[in-house]
Image (cartoon, rainbow, N blue to C red):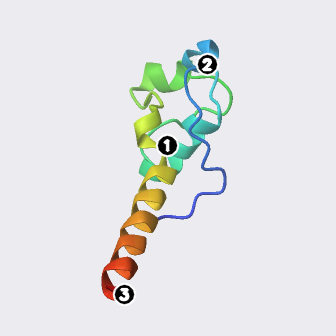
Amino acid sequence: MQQIHDSDMITGHPLENVINGPAHHTLHHLFFTVNYGQYFTWADRWGGSYRHPASELDPLLEALAAKEAKKKEVIGKEE
């Protein structure tokens, strides 16, 4: 899993279509081809590089799934 310095994928705020928040920034670090705007989304929309944050893209979900898989693996070895 890639280390991201903010990793915040809180979504659903009514202003996230206009203001770049931490979730936009996290997507920028995951894909490096989207969400370049510093404060607002209009430039990315205009330039075709906007990607809307979705909660299922949260990198924490991948980390939690890996942790759960490892836990099951350890339990399987103990039996």
Give SS at disc 3: helix
Amino acid type of the residue tagged 1 in the rendering: Leu
Would residue 62 be found to the left or right of residue 76 on screen?
A: right
The location of residue 48, given as percent across then percent down, is 38, 26
- Which sits earlier in the primary sequence, circle 1 or circle 3? 1
At a point 45% along the width and 50% down the height, the residue shown is: 61
- The tag on residue 13 is 2
Amino acid type of the residue tagged 2 in the rendering: His
**What is the residue that sits farthest to the top in this orientation?**
14
Q: Nearer the viewer, residue 53 or 65?
A: 65
Q: Quadrant of residue 74?
A: bottom left
At a point 59% along the width and 32% down the height, the residue shown is: 37
Which tag is nearer the camera, tag 1 or tag 2?
A: 2
Q: CA distance from mark 1 to mark 3?
A: 39 Å
Amino acid type of the residue tagged 3 in the rendering: Glu
Cβ atoms at labels 1 and 3 below 8 Å apart: no
- The tag on residue 78 is 3
Give SS at disc 2: loop
Which tag is nearer the camera, tag 2 or tag 3?
A: 3
Q: Nearer the viewer, residue 75 or 2?
A: 75
At a point 42% along the width and 49% down the height, the residue shown is: 31
Callout 1: 10 Å neighbours few (<14), some, many (20+)?
many
In the picture of the structure, the residue carrying the numbered disc 1 is: 27
The location of residue 13, given as percent across then percent down, is 61, 18
**What is the residue that sits farthest to the front in this orientation?**
79
**Dividing the image into 4 quarters, which one contains the C terminus?**
bottom left
Question: Eyeballing the image, is 5 above or below 42?
Answer: below
At a point 48% along the width and 44% down the height, the residue shown is: 58
Which tag is nearer the camera, tag 1 or tag 3?
A: 3
Question: Eyeballing the image, is 33 above or below 46?
Answer: below
The location of residue 65, given as percent across then percent down, is 40, 59
- Which sits earlier in the primary sequence, circle 1 or circle 2? 2
